[in-house]
Amino acid sequence: MKNKSGPKNLPEEFAGEPQPQDEAKPLSELHPGEAAEVLQNLPAAEQAEALLNLEPPKAADILESLPDDRAAAAIMDMAPEDASAIVQEMQTDEQVDLLQDVSEEHAESILEQIDEKDAQVARKLLEYAEDTAGGLMQREYIPIYKEKNAKEVILHLQVESEKYKDYPATYLYVVDGKGRLNGVVSMRSLLLNKPGATVKELTNTEFVSVPASMPGQELVKVFRKYHYLAVPVLDEEGVLLGVVTEDDAMRFAEEEADEELLRFSGIVKGDEFRDMPFFPRSWRRLSWLSINIILNCVAASVIAYYQDTLQAVIALAVFLPIISDMSGCSGNQAVAVSIRELSLDRIRPGNFLWVLGKEASIGLLNGLALGTIIGLIAFAWKGSVLLGAIVGAALWINTIVAVSIGGMTPLLLRSINQDPAIASSPILTTLTDMCGFFVLLTLATKYVHLLPQ
Amino acid sequence: MKNKSGPKNLPEEFAGEPQPQDEAKPLSELHPGEAAEVLQNLPAAEQAEALLNLEPPKAADILESLPDDRAAAAIMDMAPEDASAIVQEMQTDEQVDLLQDVSEEHAESILEQIDEKDAQVARKLLEYAEDTAGGLMQREYIPIYKEKNAKEVILHLQVESEKYKDYPATYLYVVDGKGRLNGVVSMRSLLLNKPGATVKELTNTEFVSVPASMPGQELVKVFRKYHYLAVPVLDEEGVLLGVVTEDDAMRFAEEEADEELLRFSGIVKGDEFRDMPFFPRSWRRLSWLSINIILNCVAASVIAYYQDTLQAVIALAVFLPIISDMSGCSGNQAVAVSIRELSLDRIRPGNFLWVLGKEASIGLLNGLALGTIIGLIAFAWKGSVLLGAIVGAALWINTIVAVSIGGMTPLLLRSINQDPAIASSPILTTLTDMCGFFVLLTLATKYVHLLPQ
């Protein structure tokens, strides 16, 4: 609650918008979140300069509030010695996030300029992948010793209050001489007990901890299950490396979900903002599209095989894209449900048969409805009951196939440790296109002499 | 940190899985998060009974850890008087979430059985929509008065510690006689200051608050901007109604992002788990599909118009589904980027021209690449440079059209307050199919006598 511009009851229409009176104020007097917003509205070239005009601690606060890619761009625009003065003031987890997003040389030049001990910590943290507990944890935690009592701990906190100001201080961590974690004391229990109580008495030795290598997605499940405000990260010897806070974990979960939508739509790596450089953006999209176009050609080759039937019943050419598109739609619904159920642990990769049963029954009903609609349209257009029946049957059958494949593909991909979001849709559409074209054209070939020419 | 089963350093392979030793323990001895997991593995019919075998406070903790739909199903399986004993023990925000998900009669019967005053609070909260600050807030906050001093407040907290046990107690709220919020005191400042300090001295009067009607999406932006652990919710007179905690807001954000993926894939309302009842699931999917099939037929009618050209150059029938599918893919990439940029406030609905410029330039390059690939394939197949050129040009042009429409559709939908996730894709594919079929078949008609018959 460090906002300096007085109480605000944010009305809906202003929330998220810089408020008029804010823009007139210098950046240094705004809440970092507000300053970050003002900064983002400046031309990209001026953002680094605006930060350099501030005191480093203030600039660091604002950098922490900027989206990762913007913060990295601003740091890249600064000389390493200027950047290091700001980076030095950031929290370790934010520091490392940032350095992971700038070029390796630039990161190294910055680390060379900051305090030797801080640089060492940062280099250690940089070894953990961004999306693991090690990459998400911060080193700022308050260690205490079990020999002390509540009063001594409170005195210590008061003496060091400046240092601990920005620490996520819901819990204090009881460590031994070798840095191993013995237990956890909540701020609340410190507050609500007699001053003479020893740390040992207040300590909860029943805590959940995680290894630094735990993937972010698993970490999110731990928070979702236990609802803790922070979880300690330990190495193999039980030494406390840092803590991951609930808000950082949930923020990670939200970003992951956002990026999943992008990967699902064919944006490789799930990351694109339109103010990123042109060629990498174009390339990420194209690399996925060019695999798709090859798969598409493979599927469409089924059509080429039935040229004579098509020549005889040209109306079929109208229904081929419809069958392809509708099966893709039905199948993608099933893909999306499977992706969500997997990410929320509602299904396991082994639940093939259960998913198959659920999807096939939906396909049976919805395919019947869609087949009837398209069959009636075909009949109305050409006056042929047989054409309607063939087109309708093909879509019915193919809808059942599409939802079954759509439901199971993410499970298969997950069970071989591939990302279901990016790969499911191309696999689905290729298989269902082939199947749909085959069913429609085989049926039509069989009755070709009875169909309207 | 209430886990009763001893310290655990969760290894990766166990995270999210009930651990073997847990399953042997009775539910009542497990952490609520673990108990919820065990419960979910029971047959649906036994879940309500298992909860009824527990003490109501324990059952309430477990219910709070269950996914919303499962918790509601369990409560629906209980008689109102049994359910009310458990509901009575839940936190207000969880209580209301739950009652919103059960039938109205059942909710009313439960409310009639619980404590009159609690029921009144719950009825009041039920008036707020689930996805607003009012719906996300909880009533459990600790009010204090500015006339007191730190020592008195701490004594009060100690006396009431049982009551306040489950409160999100990072901040204390300074209210006046009419319940209006005057300021905020952090637990930390209470702890780190002299006992004689008055509440008035410790109070931060510069706080951010939100109205109960603020939509959840806007609320998330407030948390993303200010990084607070909790934000107070006020009515028009400034009376404190409740608080929204950061973890609840971020949890909401994550659920929204998950549901956006489902809506984007055509699951109406963005909510489906396969253990929900069959017919509503089928209907939500079908309602979207049946609009799509009609749109598809409209688009495909363009093909019908060019029957003669198709009859003359049957090879075109192979390329129609490819053009349709690839344009859909390219366009959906642009749709997804716009949806994400809108939800993170990186673009505003008014930034049409900027988005158009960015997308058209990507379309120009990627369309050229895709057009070249398909052109070469067409040439290789039929040995006709002209066929290759026409098919390639059609895909090039249509890719530019698709990404431009794909990028702008979410902005247009948002500016008329429609949900971009569910509606963008059908609009996109209809328009790009029509355009793609039209371009390919018009070009082909013009040069029909030169194409391979």
Image (tube, coloured by chain):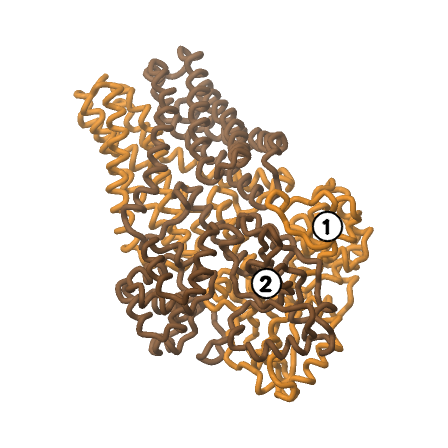
Chain colours: A brown, B orange
Asked which quadrant contains residue A209, the reply is bottom right
> Of the numbered discs in the image, which one, if any, rests on residue A417?
none
Q: Amino acid at mark 1?
A: Ala
Residue A162 visible in the picture: yes
Q: Is residue A417 left or right of residue B166?
A: left
In the foreground, A297 or B100: A297
Q: Residue at x 27, y 55 (%)?
A: B353
Q: Tag 2: residue type?
A: Leu
Density class for disc 2 (Cα within 10 Å; few <14, some 14-19, many ≥20) is many
Instruction: Choose between B384 and A73: the one closer to the eye.
Output: A73
Give the residue at mark 1: B35
Check whether the beta carbons of the residues at disc 1 and disc 2 lie within 8 A of each other.
Answer: no
Above or below, B90 against A294 in this view is below
Label count reads: 2
Task: Work out how far the residue at label 1 is from the one at label 2, CA to CA, in angstroms.
Answer: 24 Å
Relative to B182, say whether A214 is above or below.
above
> At which x and y percent is residue A274?
32, 52
Q: Is residue B74 left or right of residue B403?
A: right
- Name the image quarter holding residue B1: bottom right
Residue B437 coordinates in the image, percent (x, y) = 30, 32
Q: Which chain does the numbered disc 1 sit on?
A: B
Find disc 2 in the rendering and name its residue. B136
Indicate the secondary structure of the residue bearing disc 2: helix
Mark closer to the chain start, 1 or 2: 1
Q: Which quarter of the figure has residue B278?
A: top right
Q: Chain of mark 2?
A: B
Q: Residues within 10 Å of mark 1 (few under 14, many from 20)?
A: many
The answer to whether residue A244 is visible is no
Of the two numbered discs 1 and 2 in the rendering, the one whose residue sits closer to the viewer? 1
Under tag 1, what secondary structure?
Answer: helix
